[in-house]
Each structure stands twice: as C-alpha cells, then as structure tokens.
Image (cartoon, coloured by chain):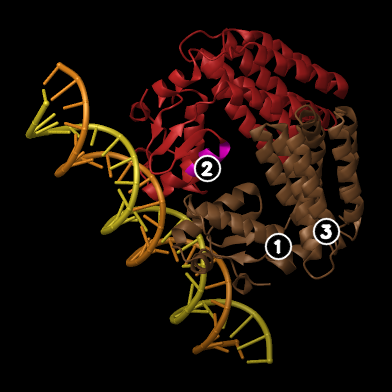
Chain colours: A red, B brown, C orange, D yellow
Amino acid sequence: MNIADQTFPVVDSAIEDRAQAIRDQLRDAIVDRRLAPGTKLSEGEVGTLFDVSRTVARAALQMLSFEGLVRTERNRGAFVANPSPEEARQVFASRRLIEPGIAIAAAGRMTPAHVVAFKAQLEEEGRFIAERGPNARRSEIKASGDFHLLLASVAGNVILQRFMEELVARSSLVIALYGRSGVSSCGHSEHMNILDALENGNSERASALMLHHIDHIEADLDLRVRSGPALRQALEL
Amino acid sequence: MNIADQTFPVVDSAIEDRAQAIRDQLRDAIVDRRLAPGTKLSEGEVGTLFDVSRTVARAALQMLSFEGLVRTERNRGAFVANPSPEEARQVFASRRLIEPGIAIAAAGRMTPAHVVAFKAQLEEEGRFIAERGPNARRSEIKASGDFHLLLASVAGNVILQRFMEELVARSSLVIALYGRSGVSSCGHSEHMNILDALENGNSERASALMLHHIDHIEADLDLRVRSGPALRQALEL
DNA sequence: TGCGCAAAAATCGTATGCAATCTTTTCTCA
DNA sequence: TGAGAAAAGATTGCATACGATTTTTGCGCA
C-alpha cells in the first residue's frame, strides 16, 4: 500500500494547529492499517496531500515519531513503525502494569454519565463485530481501543491518559501485525464484564478482569519471528 | 531568572540531531532549575544562544513540550512549565502506579555489573548530599532522579523507560517548586535499602520499599495553593 | 547479461523571508 | 490625569530556497 493511494478528508474545524490535525489523520490511518507498517511517509508527499508546506508536514511526522507510530531515519525519511515482537511484548507488559491501576482509579470516579458513555461505546463495538466486510476488522480493533481510552479518561489522570493513548495506538499496530483471528468477540464480552464491575464500584474485580483481558489479547498474538530476524529485516526495509 | 543569563556548553559530539542536543541541554537546565518555571523561551533567543536558526530551536521546544517540561501557547511562545498542584499529584500518582512494577522487573534482571553501577550512583548521590553550596540542592534532586532512571533502564522495557524519563523530569520540576527541605538525605537511605532488596532478588520487598519511597517524596511536598489559584495565575504569566 | 561507477533525481536538514498575531508604547481626547 | 485607540515593535506560523545526503538511473565495460 502506498500513501498516495490514500484519501484524507478535509479538516473542517482547524482552529488549532494544522500539524496536529495532520498528525491525527495520519495516526488514524496508521492505527486503522490503511497505511501499512513500513510505508514511507515523505515530507513532501504528506505536505502535498494535505496541502501544506513541508515545514508543517515535518512537524506532524515528528509528533508521530514521539508516539512511536513512526520511525524516522536521518536523511532518509519517516516510515510507519514496524514493531518487533520484542517491542510488542513491551507494549503489553506496560499495559499490564498500568491498566489495572487505571481501572481502580476509574472505579472510584464512575458517574451515571460515564456509564451511559460506556454503554454507547460497547454498543458500537458490538455493531462492528456483527458487521462483515473488509473494514470490519479495522473498526473492531479501533473500537476495542476506544474502550480503554474511555476508561483512561474516566480515571482522571491526564498524564496516564496520554501514556494510554500511546499504548493503545501501538497496540493497534501490533494486533494488526501479529493478531491471529477472533479474540475480539471474546474481548467484547470482557469489556462488558469490566464495565459491570466498574458500575458496581467493585474496583478489585475490575482491576483483575482488566489484567486477564490484557493477557487474553496478548495470548491471541503470534509473536514468533517468522523467518529469522535478519532476513525479515532485510526484506522489509 | 532569564534565559539570556544562561551559558550553555558547546556540544562536542553532535553527529546526531542538533535539535536533540539543544533539547537535552534545555531539559537539564529546566530540571536543574537554572531556568525557572514560567521563563519564556522564545524561538529566536534559543536559536541565537545555540547558534542555530529558529527552525531548529523550534523543533527542540516542540520536543520539550511533548515531555511536559515546556508549555506552548499559540502565537505567544514557549514557557518553562509551571505544574499546578493537581499536575504534581498526577505525576506522583503515575509513579506510584509504575515504579513498583519497574522495581519487580528490575529485581529479576539484576547482574553484578548493574550492582556496581548502582553503588557508584549512590556514592555520587551521597557526595552531593554532603556538599554544601548553592548548587547542592539541585545536584541532589538530579542525582536522586538518576537512581530511578537507572532502575528503569535495568528493568529492560524501553517504553516504560521513556515514560519514567518524563515522570522523573517532571518530578524534578515539582520538587523544585513545592519541595520543603531535607527529605533527600532520608531518600538516600531509602535508595540504599531498595538496592539491597534488589541485590538479594527480593522483588516484593523492593517493590514495597519503592512505593513507600514515592509516598515519602510526595509527603515532603507542600501542595497547598498559595494564594488562590486565580491570583496566582494572574501574577505569573 | 551482469557488474561497477558516475550523473541525475529525489529527499532531507536548515536558514531565511513574509504575513498574521500578539504585546507594548504612544497619542488623543474627555 | 486617566482611559481608550492607534501605531510600532516583537514574536510566532508558515512557505520557500538552497546546500547536503541519499537513492535511483543510465551507461560503459567485462
């Protein structure tokens, strides 16, 4: 897949930085796997696509590189990240460390409004799972991540929330790369159980369920190196 | 304090990005409190000081803004961050969540070489505490942070390591702003106890000690708002 | 045909210029 | 004298230009 094959909707409410808007759209494209890992993102091309100068495109790419979604090589350019199995493991190790704590914090702050938001989120998630079609899998991954982001926002710690945004984005990449098949339907029911615990203020249970949920997601990955890391490295560039 | 009062050593081994080198020096200056919170960092001034164009200076400031050490306002510029008490609490809440886990991971990976590195680190820390003078406090804060960064590097998860770099840097700012007095000597002995547990492979103990250690650091802060947030906000700009 | 090397093209790193925005100063008028 | 408005100055946002580095292309030669 080439970046030039993509079409990006025009940003309507761009009071804020244009670079930020471009970053958001590129991030969506990466997380949704419309841009495959390894795809080159040249400053000029990105700039042309979004109708901005290289300066702005470069800033957007720099942001993505900070988030770990893009890898930049000096004098060579930016590429959609291609996380190694080791990186994948570290992403999930980090989530195992952070998310149970986030679940506990969120359990202590749940309001009826939050519950409504979660229910809407889970309903949408269910719709994507029921759906069939080429985009179903993508939407499923994205919706699943959104559940965790919503939880992080309820927890009320903006620093951890930002960490989680990064971890969820990287997880989506990892799942797209190494995911096997249909853990997601199972994940959906786990989300519902977690919400149930949150709703009842049972923080311990929510935390434990979250830990298991992350374990299940990671267990569904196939993190064996495919054909020797050297060859793999050589082939992808 | 003004940024123009600072002198920055010339970067010798600058094969890598110049922007990154500038970021590192500015970060040191912020963490060491040579640049006070609220100080304006104009692109032009930074560029002149480091003898680069505004383009490069801007990139360095953007990086610092991602790390939370600098706050940028559109069309107004960049300022050394001035974390609120609420932000300070969130920094330490994040550390309480992450660092005990890092201690456990590190305990399982300690080698004799690591022990040597830790001992050297603690010795330097001790020297700074014994020292008197205007820079003693700064060096103390920095050395104390370095212990935690060393631990994170031993844990072997580069993602968590980067999170910790950010959290330690922000903590230094917070301690400089809200710290009372001499927890540090006490902190030093706590570091030694943690190392002891790590050396014996007692991960549970290391984890528990770390949690208490973070509690102690936060307990030494005075996070009461000084004179009403509105006035405070109005005065500092 | 296949290989090595040089020229060309593409791309990046950085400096600089201009317009837009914000801040400060100055001027006017009550 | 003080408040408000207008002008001047400073600073950012962004585009563009140019040298440096990398990649690709083209060509000669074995």
Please state which of residues B229 and A207 is positioned toward the viewer in this rendering: A207
At horizontal 86% and vertical 55% (from top left) the residue drawn is B223
Magenta segment includes A126: no
Where residue B18 sits in the image (x, y, percent)? 49, 55
The residue under label 2 is: A63
Question: Which circle marks residue B127 in the picture?
Answer: 3
Q: Is residue A48 visible to the viewer in this orientation of the structure?
A: no
Please state which of residues A76 and B188 is positioned toward the viewer in this rendering: B188
Q: Chain of mark 2?
A: A
The residue under label 1 is: B37
At horizontal 35% and vertical 37% (from top left) the residue drawn is A49
Magenta segment includes A66: yes
Where residue D16 sits in the image (x, y, percent)? 29, 55
Where residue B192 sits in the image (x, y, percent)? 88, 44
- The mark lying in front, picked from 3 and 2, is 3
Please tell me whether the stretch drawn in magenta is mainly helix, strand or loop: helix
Badge 3 marks a residue whose secondary structure is helix
Separation of disc 3 and disc 2 at Cα?
A: 39 Å
Q: Quadrant of residue B125?
A: bottom right
Relative to B66, A200 lies left or right: right
Region of the chain picked out in magenta, as a range: A62-67
Q: Chain of mark 3?
A: B
Amino acid carrying mark 1 in the image:
Pro
